[in-house]
Image (cartoon, helix red, strand yellow):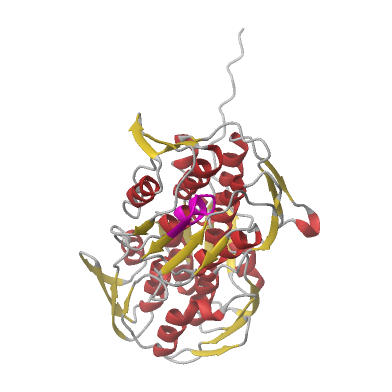
Amino acid sequence: MDKFVIRGGNPLLGTVRISGAKNAALPAMAAALLTEEPVILENVPQVRDIETERKLLATMGAEVELGYGRAQHRTTICCRNPANPEASYDLVKTMRASTLVLGPLVARMKEARVSLPGGCAIGARPIDLHIKGLEKLGARISQEHGYIEARAERLRGAQIRFDRITVTGTEDLLMAATLAEGETVLENCAREPEVVDLAALLTKMGARIEGAGTSTIRVQGVEQLHGARHRIIPDRIEAGTFVVAGALTGGDLTVAGCEPRHLDALLQKIQECGIRISVTDDSIRVTGDGPLKGADIATEEYPGFATDLQAQYMALATQCDGVSIVDEHIFENRFMHAQELVRMGANIKIESHRATVRGKTPLSGAAVLASDLRASASLVLAALVADGETIIDRVYHIDRGYERIEEKLRGVGAQIRRIGELLPKRAASPVAV
């Protein structure tokens, strides 16, 4: 099991380029199930979750071709003859976004068998809203042996209002509605950029969609979709992570190839903390050469402060003068990184969904454990300013969503290396005499 070894104290200087958005690429790959023609996706990040999705689609009979050389971030998916409409537990348990195949499978193949995702380190993310929506579209749903089974000769348009805002639920039903008969109106939708990106791909494939990026999306169903070529948007969470890294280390870092407008909530808070920000159409320059002061955040659905940046912001708050209040309103159990930060010297108190961070506190290197994808990113950030050496275990979590993060950090001055698990030497076998 790989670990990161990080020695803190170096400001990040230079330019780092952002990869494609994992959370946009995953639903885009699932959308390829909706057509028999090839779907070509560009700017696909090389991360563990993408490989999991590739395996999942392959088990269904899809041909998935990964690019090499200069085209290494291009993926071509062709679901000409899908044969197995099942997402097994072995794959779904490692990546909850696997459930995004539910809607496309029912719409195209008329049936689906998808494992329930089970628990998660950062709290439950049930798919009940997916199921309720598909039932309104005319699917017959049953549950047995830990699997959701759905069937429909053809889905029919309906008016669906989500009980609460859900990104994957919006994406799943949006894909299903493209092949449903008649009009589907989705209300109380997620407005995340990843939803808008999925709608852009589906439109290129021949879908008729209005309102993506707003709370109401209208879909006129069509008989069939065709292939398309689409470039995945930049990863706003990776970009935000590097923005925080530049601010935290007192560096002068340019985050290039991103969409600054997707990060308005974070950039506003970063500036409240005393960080200088300059923005172009596709880059953010972060200059952190002065004292930092605390600022409060509360996570919300987009365009509010992203829950996926909460852990990284908490690492920054440990180095800000004064008190910072962090309210987590999206997921329960998403403060598991706080105890690891405390091990490094942070002053953090947790009460229910609220964390109180008192700074500035000096951090020191320690052996810490990553509990989930974004928690692992916060520990990397804290290690960049800690005195001495930090060893972060279970970095497979960070590999799920960050492409070559250690190489990118080294390129702008960080002292970070990856090491494999050191196994004890095997004892020599006894020799018979």
Farthest residue in the left direction? 351
- Whether residue 111 is situated above or below residue 354 in the rendered picture: above
Q: Is residue 286 in view?
A: yes
Farthest residue in the right direction? 69
Q: What is the quadrant of the C terminus in the image?
A: top right
Viewer-side residue, 239 vs 391: 239
Viewer-side residue, 170 vs 334: 170
Q: Position of residue 39 (x, y in %)?
A: 68, 52
Decide whether residue 178 is among the magenta residues.
yes
Q: Residue at x 62, y 38 (%)?
A: 58
Q: Residue at x 34, y 55 (%)?
A: 122
- Whether residue 253 is situated above or below residue 156 in the rendered picture: below
Q: In the figure, is residue 48 to the left or right of 303?
A: right
* Residues drawn in magenta: 173-184
Q: Position of residue 148 (x, y in %)?
A: 39, 37
Decide whether residue 74 is among the magenta residues.
no
Answer with the quarter of the image where residue 299 lies: bottom left
Q: Residue at x 48, y 49 (%)?
A: 100
Q: In the figure, is residue 237 to the left or right of 409?
A: left
Q: Position of residue 233 (x, y in %)?
A: 60, 68
- Whether residue 5 is situated above or below residue 285 in the rendered picture: above
Viewer-side residue, 43 vs 120: 43
